[in-house]
Amino acid sequence: MKTAIFSDFDGTISLKDVGYSLFHYFSDGKNDALLPDWKSGVMSTRDCLLAEAEMVHATPEEIYAFIDTIGIDSDFPILLKIAQEKSIPLKILSDGLDVYIKYLLEKEGLGDLDFLANKAELVDNTIKITFEHTNKECKSCGICKGEIIREFRENQDKPYQIVFIGDGYSDVCAAKEADILFAKKDLKEYCMKEDISFISYSNFNNVLTELKQRNII
Ligand SMILES: [Mg+2]
Ligand SMILES: [Zn+2]
């Protein structure tokens, strides 16, 4: 069977959750008050992101200087290279912001890589977020990764096995759709609670090893 790989960005490809860290830093930790409601599903991702962005008062230079302190997992480009050689589609699905994903990928020489994320502009000393993506059903996510995976399957003439790699609550809809799920941190806890099967991992080196063992890459 053919394989497609989808991966979260924040805290999965990037070594720290860029969105969370950025909002935490520039709001002096005030964004933490929003997180219990977001994690329990009372507050949607869109409302949470907009509220967090309102707390930011910083110049683009200050924001990029902060983003610059966060690196990416050095084994992710290895997985990407193998996927490209084997014509395995690999796409980043993020419910974070395009502005830092683009910046960090370009910095790593991965600027051509396809990704989906919410749109953000650094203007008027703050972050202006727009939601151009329309979810069909999901009211929780900004961009519903579960719906994206379902759409991908529907658009193929052959069945695909879907690998998904993630770490947090923005990945829960995708977790339900994936055939092979790599989960850590909050996503792992969610999967244990909801009885969703997953492979526990810490980094992309683990992902590479596991996918090779299963003859997927
Ligand atoms: Mg994440
Ligand atoms: Zn969703």
Image (cartoon, rainbow, N blue to C red):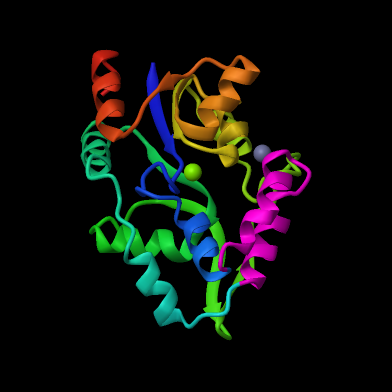
Asked whether, in this view, residue 3 is left or right of residue 155, the answer is left
Asked whether, in this view, residue 109 is left or right of residue 141, the answer is left
Q: Is residue 92 on the magenta stretch?
A: no
The C terminus sits in image quarter: top left
Q: How many marks?
A: 0
Q: Residue at x 34, y 52 (%)?
A: 113
Q: Residue at x 44, y 51 (%)?
A: 115
Q: Residue at x 22, y 34 (%)?
A: 82
Nearer the observer, 52 or 175: 52
* Image coordinates for residue 42, horizontal then vertical, percent: 78, 44
Nearer the observer, 173 or 5: 173
Q: Is residue 187 above or below residue 36?
A: above
Ligand 2 location (quadrant): top right
Asked whether, in this view, residue 215 is left or right of residue 179, the answer is left
Determine which quarter of the picture holds residue 41: top right
Determine which quarter of the picture holds residue 141: top right
* Image coordinates for residue 139, horizontal then vertical, percent: 76, 44
Q: Is residue 43 on the magenta stretch?
A: yes
Overall secondary structure of the magenta section: helix
Q: Which residues are magenta?
A: 28-55
The N terminus sits in image quarter: top left
Residue 183 visible at all:
yes
Q: Residue at x 46, y 42 (%)?
A: 8
* Image coordinates for residue 92, horizontal then vertical, percent: 43, 45
Q: Is residue 123 above or below residue 6?
A: below
Residue 131 visible at all:
no
* Image coordinates for residue 53, horizontal then vertical, percent: 62, 68
